[in-house]
Amino acid sequence: MKKKSLIVLLAALMVLSVAIAGCSSGTQKPEQQAQQKKETVIRYNLGAQPETIDPALNSAVDGANVILHTFEGLVNLDEHQQPVPGVAEKWEVSNDGLVWTFHLRKNAKWSDGQPVTAKDFAYAWKRALDPATGAEYAYQLYYIKNGQAFNEGKATADDLGIKVVDDYTIEVTLEAPTPYILQIFAFPTLFPVRQDIVEKYGDKWAQQADTYIGNGAFKVSEMVYQDHITMVKNENYWNKDAIKPDKLIFTEMTDESTMLASYENGEVDVIDNMPSEEISRLQNDPNSGFVLGANLGTYYIDFNNQKPPFNNPLVRKAFSLAIDRKAIVENVTKGGQLPADAFVGPGFPDADPTKQFHDVQGPFYDATKANVEEAKKALAEAGYPDGKGFPKVTYLYNEGQGHQNIAQALQEMWKQNLGVEVELASQEWQVFQETRRRGDYDIARDGWLADYTDPMTMLDLFTSNSGNNNAQYKNPEYDALIDKAKKTNNEAERMQAMHDAQQLLLGQDWAVAPLYFYTDPYCVKPGLKGVIADPLGFKRFHFAYWENQ
């Protein structure tokens, strides 16, 4: 009897082992397989629907965040903003700093499998510079020989310092040696685009997932207008094995309370904005994932320099000095921002790299309070004593509780300190950008995040030919100083020219009113690692992963 029981037991064990083996040999159901290899998905709230994700036409951070994941330039920037190889595996520069030769890697491909070639870069740059394209960031390519002349119709495309040596070599000749040029080559406006795709689909090429062909780490698989953009890992990307996420979902919520609720409910993993009144709570909660990061940039006010009454610098001066910037950052924004006493903030080196450009020049006004008496004096000199006779004006801002709160604070300060009534108006983000670009406003909110770590990125914004000069500021002397700074080989002279330019911008012309220097308050779900939040305002997820996955 015992012997028979042992045989039965052995037989049962054999059946069980076969069943177990079957479960681990590929015979399990698809849902069981999915559980074993979980897809790495990261959900980030992008904010408003980008106005465009065409590399040549985009000029906003939201659009750039998409482009940085779906395209790649000759050069990439690492987490410390240092240039590293991108599509170009190596490069060399001539002794005079003018001629840069880039050697493209031969395994770089577009998301449809076609090779990325030097011609794709040459086409993209010429397209961005072509005046018919209307790229606001065309001036970012003025560093290329004859770039500005071509953009202004004074030269042809053949005159540009762009030479396709062969399919995998491109030579670029600059107008002048530029110390930060590799950071320019890493900027989205200089990313390649496919000529055949752009010419076949026209403006719609960047509006549909199936025609949005990129060369980056991810490819767009779905676009739902004003809802989300989904990206999946690009199997043709040359460095795909280093890319961690399988899928990115960029949602498009604009209401800050909704963003935070979605984050805390587990519907998104990373958010950039939250109601200012919630920041203190989030900072004090060790499980919130709140981070107060650094940003190189300035939140500021555009005065329409070409439209009465703000075509008068005394009026602009009065409105700027009447603002209590410290009260705004402490009582309204509450995100650790610094009240701005200049346009170029901390973080940019001067000629002496141990000193900051901001500190060398010093403040243009006392940003810790409203300079009421000086503001009233300027307004009286402009012909409006105590605000009497001042025309009806409107402050325009894009939708969002944070911008609205700032607008209301400014409205009250101008009323109390100048005796001026200012109406408020808001517009949806895409409409607002176009309205502001056209100069169809009196006063408007604005903001600028650095494109690279040199003061030039803040100051060439206001040249007469800049497509991002929303203030409509025109001063030939200012233009000449910026041009000098871009062309001199002497670092001390270069910095001095930029200091002189900022003196004109704020010390003389009061063209804009800086409010505060940005910080970057954001939340990342605990357990999500490898997210790069760089000081230029971008969130990069190429190497992000879930800790326990």
Image: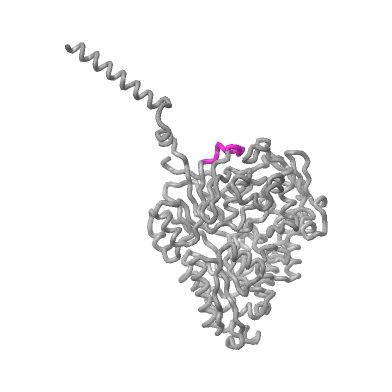
In this rendering, position of residue 132 left or right of residue 244 = right
Say if 69 sits above or below 325 in the image. above
Residue 170 drawn at (x, y percent): 75, 43
Residue at 65% from the left image edge and 49% from the top image edge: 205
To which quarter of the image does residue 455 belong? bottom right
In this rendering, position of residue 113 left or right of residue 477 = left
Residue at 55% from the left image edge and 77% from the top image edge: 423
Q: Main secondary structure of the magenta part?
A: loop
Say if 34 sits above or below 360 in the image. above
List the single residue furthest toward the left. 1
In this rendering, position of residue 12 left or right of residue 373 = left
To which quarter of the image does residue 20 belong? top left
In this rendering, position of residue 437 left or right of residue 401 = right
Q: Is residue 100 magenta?
A: no
Q: Is residue 301 visible?
A: yes
Colour setting: one colour
Say if 50 sits above or below 376 in the image. above
The quarter in which the N terminus is drawn is: top left
Residue 121 drawn at (x, y percent): 71, 46
Q: Is residue 354 visible?
A: no
Magenta-tinted stretch: 235-244
Residue 84 drawn at (x, y percent): 63, 45
- Which residue is nearer to you in this view: 437 or 344? 437
Please state the total of marks drawn on the protein image. 0
Residue 479 drawn at (x, y percent): 74, 66
The quarter in which the C terminus is drawn is: top left
Residue at 49% from the left image edge and 52% from the top image edge: 44
